[in-house]
Image (spheres, helix red, strand yellow):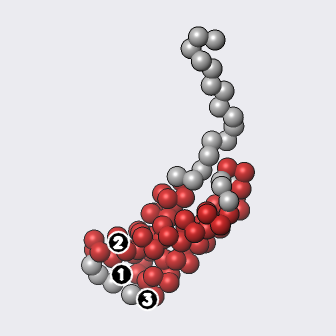
Amino acid sequence: MLLEALSSAILGLALAWAVAHRMPHRLPARSLVLSTGVAGGLFGAFITHTALDFGNLFVILIGAAVVSAASLSLLVRPAGRLSRHSATA
């Protein structure tokens, strides 16, 4: 179980680092991105381990990666400025 937690935290950190390195202009502070990746990885491993209840490390890491990517996607901002015009203008 310790190996699952450590592996999923490292996987979430690596995924967050890759996203922060690839699109720094569309994300908030790097510390928030990295901590969100780790937390998403740990939460994903917890959910997968609880739902499947067996020790297949590969499946648990896939669940950790999916939840980590989903939580990181919530931090991404739009690329350009959105020009919002009022209906009366």
x and y, in percent, of residue 6 in the image: 50, 84
Q: Earlier in the sequence, mark 2 or mark 1?
A: 2
Left or right placement of residue 33 versus residue 50 in this view: right
**Mark 2 residue type:** Thr
Q: State which quarter of the image contains the N terminus.
A: bottom left
Q: Which mark, residue 17? A: none
Disc 3 crowd rating (10 Å Cα; few below 14, some 14-19, many 20+) is few
Question: Residue placed at 28% from the left, 71% from the top?
Answer: 51
**Mark 3 residue type:** Leu
Splitting the image into 4 quarters, where does residue 80 fall? top right
| Residue behind mark 3 | 2
For the question of whether residue 50 can be seen, the reply is: yes
The vertical placement of 6 against 47, above or below, is below
Q: Secondary structure at mark 2?
A: helix
x and y, in percent, of residue 10 in the image: 56, 78
Q: Earlier in the sequence, mark 3 or mark 1?
A: 3
Q: State which quarter of the image contains the C terminus.
A: top right
| Residue behind mark 1 | 56
Splitting the image into 4 quarters, where does residue 42 fall? bottom left
Q: Do labels 3 and 1 touch, CB within 8 Å?
A: no
Q: Secondary structure at mark 3?
A: helix
Mark 3–mark 2 Cα distance, whole angstroms, equals 15 Å
The vertical placement of 21 against 25, above or below, is below
**Mark 1 residue type:** Asn
Which is nearer the eye, 61 or 42? 42
Left or right placement of residue 52 versus residue 1 in this view: left
x and y, in percent, of residue 87 in the image: 56, 14
| Residue behind mark 2 | 48
